[in-house]
Amino acid sequence: MLSFQAAVRKAVSDYNRYRSPEAAATLVEIGENQLTVDFGGAFCLGCGVGDYFEGFIYELKRYAKVKMTVSSFEQIEPLKFRVKFSYSLLRG
């Protein structure tokens, strides 16, 4: 089983492999119960950018037993968003 930090890095790598250049994730910070990731790219704005953030959660769940939700996001540049995820690791 991967450590949570390793699982996050693997999820970022896989996310970018399958979604870039339309969307790309960059890890900003791993906190005790919060994860911050920047998302940038051309996005499919008609789909809603929130779908890209939710997609990262599903990617991470492939590598870690975690309960995670988007707690906040803000547009920090044109076509770039900073997303804060709240998480708790699950046992087992």
Image (spheres, helix red, strand yellow):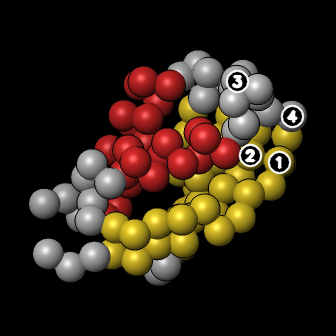
Of the numbered discs in the image, which one, if any, rests on residue 44? 3
Kindly identify which numbered label has been placed on residue 78.
4
Residues tagged 1 and 2 counted as in contact (Cβ below 8 A) = yes
Vertical arrangement, residue 69 with respect to residue 83, above or below: below
Judge depth for marks 1 and 3 and give the one in front: 3
Residues at marks 4 and 1 touching, judged by CB atoms closer than 8 Å: yes
Q: Position of residue 30 (x, y in %)?
A: 49, 67
Give the number of marks.
4
Q: Reply above or below: 91 against 68.
A: below
* Disc 2 to disc 3: CB gap under 8 Å: no
Of circles 2 and 3, the one toward us is 3
Q: Is residue 68 left or right of residue 8?
A: right
- Kindly identify which residue carries mark 2: 81
Question: Residue 91's quadrant in the figure?
Answer: bottom left
Q: Residues within 10 Å of mark 4 (few under 14, many from 20)?
A: few
- Give the CA distance from mark 4 to mark 3: 14 Å
Q: Amino acid at mark 4?
A: Pro
Q: CA distance from mark 1 to mark 3?
A: 15 Å
Q: Determine which residue is flagged by label 1.
A: 75
